[in-house]
Image: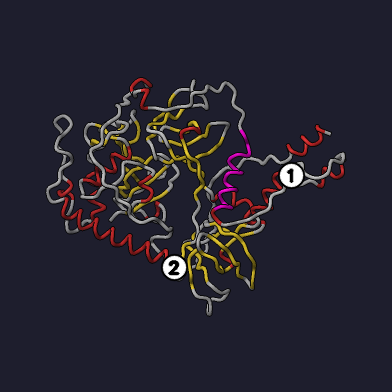
Amino acid sequence: MQKTRLQLLAMGVATAVTIGGVGINANASASKVTTVLPSAGISYALTGDSVSLSNLAGDNDTDVAENEIEDSAVTITETTPLASTLQENILNDIQKATGATIPQEEPGTGTEEEVTEDNAEEELTAEEKEEERFRSLVIAQVNDYVNVRDNPSEEDGEIIGKLYDDSVGTFIEEADGWYKIKSGSVEGYVKAEYCVTGEDAVELAKQVGKRIATVTTTTLKVRSGPSTDDEVLGLVPIEDELVVTEELDGWVKVSIEEGEGYVSMDYVELSTEFVEAESKAEEEARLKKEEEARLAALAQAKKGTKSSSSEGGSKGSKNYNSAGSYTTQSSSIGSAVASFATQFVGNPYVYGGSSLTNGTDCSGFVMSVYANFGVSLPHSSGADRSVGAAVDGLANAQAGDIVCYSGHVGIYIGGGQIVHASTAKTGIKISDAGYRQVLAVRRIF
């Protein structure tokens, strides 16, 4: 009897998922908008002088003070992947984000009767249970967004919000070609032709959630394997955000500039990101805040570039032009930012640094470049994902835009390229902007 109950429990294990992206294009709005995703607006943070923690010219661990770096105290000699963990956590966060209340049957419940071959076949598999849950979701599949209305009618229904592409909502009911949904603070109706639900939402639901690990310790080691015995691939500062591709017992697999590696769960906070519906009032407040911040930054840049210089010093005998020398009547400030930034190609990468000539890390590079144009940005690639206004992908990027990746950030210079402080081995260089998965593109000016 005990063996039978264990067999039933085992049937509740879910399979792992791979997070990716999928797009089904349809036009749901009258005109295309430049900014298609809700954002917190420009959140410039005043920062003081940054102090370099270390210069990682090579791969030597001892270059960083051990008391500055926290890592798992336990060496894992044998790691068994929990195949269902990432998928189940994404599902739970989808339900929390959308307000879904989906009943879940506990495996192994029921009477103590002997399980026969016939009634065992009637039990739902873990995959079937997962699919049942995902069928309750509504996922927008549009170029930009689909309007959410207070009534299921384009003539009589007032627009109360927008459901953006790949946004997730909870299905409430269907009425004459409309879905009533709840997403974020918005509850209303969307045209069914611009969304998927039911069977079509099952596979897509596994892909639209982005699992994020936010670093909670001063400096975190990313290792080549899920053990403190494995070599260190790179270092990540506090508050940086890394994309999770796999969750193990006590470790998560993440993506950084140096490649894919593992970090201890003890020093990260896990969450799942979704794009939710945005109410009309929320959108108006966001756009107003973004425009006010953009104008303020533009005014400051014009004022600040008149006599600014790279940083009051130079590496060797090389001379660097001031930010003001790149600003002309015929060029945009964004183009000036890009041109100013490229003159530092070849200079060194230094973890925690912010010197454009003597060494900087990726976010320090972006921060220091923009500081020469009178704009303060945070020294954090994760925080850079919230500055400025959202841009609809690389296809719409302009020179000077900030391109954000998992644990990394660079400056778009046009022609599908970025300039960035890459790694200790390569220093500041120019790369194709699409060389890694882009998490966000943000515009300051």
User: Magenta stretch: residue 40 in it?
Assistant: no
Determine the residue positioned at 48% across, 72% down.
159
Image quadrant holding the N terminus, namely top right
Q: Find disc 2 in the rendering and name its residue.
A: 280
How is this picture coloured?
secondary structure
Horizontal side of residue 422 vs 5, given as left or right: left
Quarter of the image where one finds residue 257: top left
- Density class for disc 1 (Cα within 10 Å; few <14, some 14-19, many ≥20) is some
Closer to viewer: mark 2 or mark 1 = 2
Horizontal side of residue 301 vs 214, given as left or right: left
Image quadrant holding the C terminus, namely bottom left
Quarter of the image where one finds residue 391: bottom left
Circle 2 SS class: helix
Measured as percent of width and height from the top left, residue 66 is found at 37, 22
Say which amino acid is labelled 1: Thr
Determine the residue positioned at 15% across, 48% down.
325
* Residue 252's disc number: none
The disc, 2 or 1, on the residue closer to the chain's N-terminal end is: 1
The furthest residue to the bottom:
155
Circle 1 SS class: loop
Gap in Å between the C-alphas at discs 2 and 1? 42 Å
Identify whether 401 is placed above or below 50. Answer: below
The furthest residue to the left:
307
Residue 79 in sight in this render: yes
Say which amino acid is labelled 2: Lys
Which residues make up the magenta segment? Answer: 82-96
Measured as percent of width and height from the top left, residue 243 is found at 47, 41
Q: Find disc 1 in the rendering and name its residue.
A: 125
Measured as percent of width and height from the top left, residue 234 is found at 40, 29
Determine the residue positioned at 25% across, 60% down.
295
Viewer-side residue, 110 vs 255? 110
